[in-house]
Image (cartoon, rainbow, N blue to C red):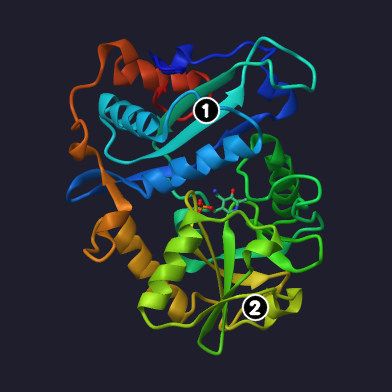
Amino acid sequence: MNGEFVAWEDAKVHVLTHGLHYGTGVFEGIRCYETELGPAVFRHVDHLDRLARSAELYYMPMPYSVSELRGATHELIARNRLRSCYIRPLVYRGYGQMGLNPLEAPVDVTIAVWEWGSYLGDEGKLHGIRAKVSSWRRLSPDSLIPHAKASGQYLNSVLAKVETLKAGYEEAILLDDHGHVCEGSGENIFLVRDGVIITPPQTASILDGISRKSVVAIARDLGIEVVERDVARAELYLADEVFMTGTAAELVPVWEIDDHRIGAGRPGELTCTLRGVFEDALHGRSERYREWLDVLGEVGGVGEADPRVGGAAERAEAAAEAGLPIEAAAG
Ligand code: PMP
């Protein structure tokens, strides 16, 4: 937190933290994978660059450079002796000034790491999920900034996710303000029709997903045509295959949408091929996509746990008490 390594149970903020009231924060979701080369963060600098751009879009001067954040993250993972983890950097307006003008409030930075399994479940990743088109539209670029990954904006995703879960589905699909298909509550979306991959364009209020970019590159490398264009809702139902991509979820097939079976009702051929290559890239099994990996050993190495961060047992206990996943926060 703000340059200090802090034990999980001490990673606290004041109740009058600006971001807590007005959503004035930007964040990233990043994953570190255990690979043959050691723990490796997937497209680390791309994620940190997006964080810096999100901060800039909301007029938040980041007190640390991308390279400082990268180094701190490496050290944090190494101190916690994690081989694989989820990484959550957060840049937010802190304590000191209430009211809607955020410019006088400090900009605080935290990074937290913890072990986090498949976001949509191992079963979902393997066999696919059931999704529902939400009645909530994705936030409009007239009101907010879809390209920014900003804390307050996620109330939009939360509404869609809750609606979907209560209706008995696993994930929401949001339409944009024109009624075109946009994305999931925390994933980009793709469909396959007649061997062509189609995904909504930058102008459809999407978050410019890093997994999306990676899967598009992989598909084109495999010689598969990828088209970025507006997608009508019914095209989802008529698709041969649908899948979603995101850092937390990775690549997840969708086998049913609004009670319409997609294709044969199981993960399609292209989906499985792309999932295989993407997972090889994530886990460092692909020489071709090696440049996407930020290997920990190359900066600091995986050393002993820092005694200041507390022992693993204490951290696990404190996290369990708080109902949270394990591990500590720093920045
Ligand atoms: N859309 C939204 C709204 C998201 O929260 C995410 C997750 N960051 C994505 C798409 C996928 O982005 P990425 O592949 O960079 O994780």
Q: Disc 1 marks which residue?
A: 62
Q: Is residue 297 above or below residue 188?
A: above
Where is residue 239 shown, x and y percent of the image? 62, 81
Where is residue 184 shown, x and y percent of the image? 64, 58
Q: Nearer the viewer, residue 217 or 286?
A: 217
* Dot 1 or dot 2, earlier in sequence: 1
Q: Is residue 217 above or below residue 192?
A: above
Residue 268 visible? The answer is yes
Horizontal arrangement in the rendering, residue 163 relative to residue 150 (left or right): right
- What's the amino acid at mark 2? Arg
Quarter-of-image position of residue 155? top right
- Callout 2 crowding tier (Cα within 10 Å): few <14, some 14–19, many ≥20: some
Quarter-of-image position of residue 257? bottom right
Where is residue 256 shown, x and y percent of the image? 64, 71
Instruction: Tell me the tag on residue 261.
Output: 2
The residue under the point 57% across, 70% down is: 190
**Element class at badge 1:** loop
**Element class at badge 2:** strand
- What's the amino acid at mark 1? Met
The residue under the point 51% across, 38% down is: 52
